[in-house]
Amino acid sequence: MNVANVTKQDLIQDVTSATGIVKNKVRVVVEQFLDLVGESLAEGNSIEIRGFGTFINKERKARPARNPKTGEIVYLQQRVIPTFKFSADIKAAIAKSAKVATTQAELSEVNSVTAGSSL
């Protein structure tokens, strides 16, 4: 499976192409949105975007862990981790896309095997 990362610049370019809005204006909006998400999470708020997902802070309990290099036991303090929970719509779209990709890969494999065999 070939996976490409989409960068902030890619998003800005895609929105510019899709809407015809000037690239500099789109950049300002995207950067302001990301700044507001970060600020809101830093304040302890969650952000729900219906049909897309929810940005939330999750508390992780204090626990012992092990340093993999030395084997020494270290204690991790309680901490807050920003996370993102996808909506059911997005999860379904990802599952459908993965299923199609898997089916195509299986068909490709079957075709290459049958093409290589001589009957």
Image: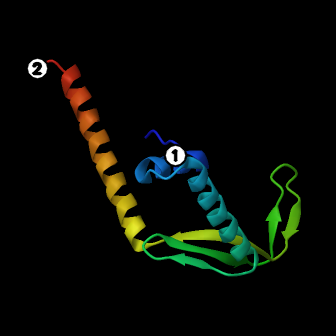
Count of residue discs? 2
Q: Examine the rendered structure and indicate whether residue 17 appears above or below residue 38.
A: above
Tell which tag, 1 or 2, sits nearer the viewer: 1
Image point (88%, 65%), residue name: 74
| Kind of residue at disc 1 | Gln
Left or right of 114 in this view: 94: right
Q: The C terminus appears in which quarter of the rendering?
A: top left
Left or right of 48 in this view: 114: left
Q: Nearer the viewer, residue 60 or 96?
A: 96
Secondary element under disc 1, as helix, strand or loop, is: helix
Image point (62%, 65%), residue name: 33
Q: The N terminus appears in which quarter of the rendering?
A: top left
Q: Nearer the viewer, residue 115 or 24?
A: 24
Image point (31%, 53%), residue name: 99
Q: Can residue 34 be spotted in the picture?
A: yes
Secondary element under disc 2, as helix, strand or loop, is: loop
The answer to which image quadrant residue 116 occupies is top left
How far apart are the alpha carbons under marks 1 and 2?
Answer: 51 Å
Label 2 crowd (10 A; few <14 / some 14-19 / many >=20): few
Q: Which residue is mark 2?
A: 119
Image point (66%, 63%), residue name: 32
Q: Nearer the viewer, residue 109 or 50?
A: 50
- Where residue 15 appears, as percent x and y from the top left, is 48, 52
- Where residue 52 appears, as percent x and y from the top left, is 46, 69
First in residue order: circle 1 vs circle 2: 1
Q: Examine the rendered structure and indicate whether residue 106 appears above or below residue 49.
A: above
| Kind of residue at disc 2 | Leu
The answer to which image quadrant residue 34 occupies is bottom right
In the picture, the disc for residue 13 is 1
Label 1 crowd (10 A; few <14 / some 14-19 / many >=20): some
Q: Nearer the viewer, residue 107 or 86?
A: 86
